[in-house]
Image (spheres, helix red, strand yellow):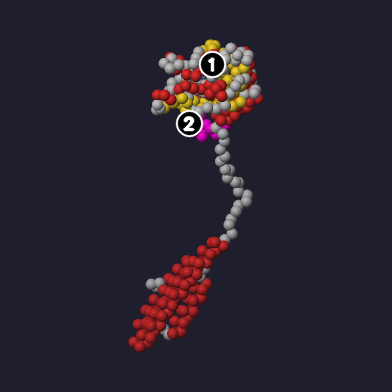
């Protein structure tokens, strides 16, 4: 073994390291030269054939060669790593223009909001304006102003959610939209025609057609001469336009302290086409509204002369109208947050 052998090994290794493309190449070169059975290790083994003096000189040169190869291998390794990182950054971003896009999920109005807008548009075209009142109401407007005095058994018809409040101004969550009749009459001189779409609350057990929080659509018309006949005509027109066809509905005698006479509006149950189901309690008819001619006391409490003014009023359960229109067999679906239900609208 001579210095020439070392030179050959060095030049060969340098050439290979220069040509290396990746880590795997470098690994292979490392094993081939610096590994346990690599070329440097073999050369070290040959040292024993040399004289003592030659051995010392060659040994030192071989150590230097070993260190040198290790150094240039490490340098090449870091060059490759840098090039790789750089290359990645420099790579053009890959857009596949033919790939179908991902549709963004677009929300939509709740079915009850859609229904509300349809109802409002129909009544607006008949000259009704929209009025509103508070959801947290006081006892006077929810009951007294509607001719339902304290301790009157009629109050039991509305299972009330009371709010902790002083005895003098007892507050509650309104049990119907009728208090807005009294509020509006106080502030607006007749003749007038209003509708009041709003949320109402009752302390009630729920079933397929009853919720404890639901929506009503109040209607009120006050003029010099109004009659049950004009009420029926307006309701018939509304039903025809809302359901898109002439539907069978009937007025049945009922009782409300704020109307006289009072009736309710019942329509053929569209969920079962009148055959009988849990929504209509197997009767084939569903009550959709309470109504009647405004009681003289209500006009009086609002400062109007019942000799001069007459009125009629109604209160539709508008969740029930939506149920009938879309054939929904359980009112509780509206507030269920069930997307499979809501996405159908
Ligand atoms: C009333 O609330 C009266 N204020 C209606 C009224 C207005 C009468 C103006 C006269 C003049 P009633 O409690 O019957 O009445 O409710 C009216 C309508 O609301 C019912 O016909 C029904 O469609 C709906 N409704 C009543 N309770 C519920 C409930 N728990 N869940 C869903 N809808 C209900």
SS at mark 2? loop
Dot placed on the residue nearer the N-terminal end, 1 or 2? 1
Q: Taking 7 as reference, is 284 above or below it?
A: above
Residue 130's quadrant in the figure? top right
Horizontal and vertical percent position of residue 162: 42, 25
Q: Nearer the viewer, residue 340 or 20?
A: 340
**Quadrant containing the C terminus in the rendered view:** top right
Comparing marks 1 and 2, which lies closer to the viewer? Answer: 1
Q: Nearer the viewer, residue 91 or 214?
A: 214
Horizontal and vertical percent position of residue 294: 55, 15
Residue 332 seen in the current view: no
The residue at 53%/64% (across/down) is 86
Give the alpha-carbon distance from disc 1 to disc 2, as whole Å: 42 Å
Stretch of the chain drawn in magenta = 334-345
Residue 89's quadrant in the figure? bottom right
SS at mark 1? helix
Residue 60's quadrant in the figure? bottom left
Q: Taking 7 as reference, is 239 above or below it?
A: above
> Which dot marks residue 300?
1
Say left or right for 46 vs 281: left
Question: Which secondary structure is most common in the magenta stretch?
Answer: loop
Disc 2 target residue = 336
Count of numbered badges drawn on the protein: 2
């Amino acid at each position: 073994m001579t210095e020439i052998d070392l030179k050959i090994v060095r030049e060969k290794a340098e050439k290979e390291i220069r040509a290396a493309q990746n880590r795997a190449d470098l690994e292979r070169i490392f094993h081939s030269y610096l590994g346990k059975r690599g070329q440097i290790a073999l050369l070290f083994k040959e040292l024993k054939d040399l004289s003592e003096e030659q051995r010392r000189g060659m040994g030192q040169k071989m150590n230097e060669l070993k260190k040198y190869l290790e150094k240039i291998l490490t340098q090449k390794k870091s060059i490759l790593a840098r090039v790789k990182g750089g290359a990645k950054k420099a790579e053009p971003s890959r857009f596949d223009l033919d790939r179908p896009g991902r549709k963004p999920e677009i929300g939509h109005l709740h079915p009850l909001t859609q229904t509300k807008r349809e109802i409002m548009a129909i009544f607006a075209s008949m000259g009704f304006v929209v009025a509103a009142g508070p959801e947290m109401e006081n006892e006077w407007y929810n009951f007294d102003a509607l001719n339902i005095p304290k301790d009157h058994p009629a109050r039991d018809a509305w299972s009330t959610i009371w709010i902790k409040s002083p005895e003098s101004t007892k507050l509650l969550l309104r049990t119907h939209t009728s208090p807005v009749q009294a509020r509006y009459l106080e502030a607006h001189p007749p003749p007038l025609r209003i509708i009041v779409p709003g949320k109402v609350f009752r302390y009630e057990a729920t079933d397929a057609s009853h919720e404890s929080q639901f929506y009503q659509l109040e209607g009120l018309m006050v003029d010099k001469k109004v009659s049950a006949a004009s009420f029926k005509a307006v309701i018939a027109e509304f039903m025809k336009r809302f359901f898109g066809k002439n539907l069978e509905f009937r007025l049945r005698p009922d009782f409300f302290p704020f109307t006289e006479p009072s009736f309710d509006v019942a329509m053929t149950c569209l969920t079962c086409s009148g055959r009988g189901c849990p929504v209509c309690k197997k009767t084939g008819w569903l009550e959709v509204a309470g109504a009647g001619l405004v009681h003289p006391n209500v006009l009086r409490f609002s400062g109007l002369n019942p000799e001069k003014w007459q009125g009629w009023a109604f209160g539709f359960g508008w969740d029930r109208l939506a149920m009938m229109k879309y054939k929904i067999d359980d009112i509780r679906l509206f507030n269920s947050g069930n997307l499979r239900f809501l996405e159908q609208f």
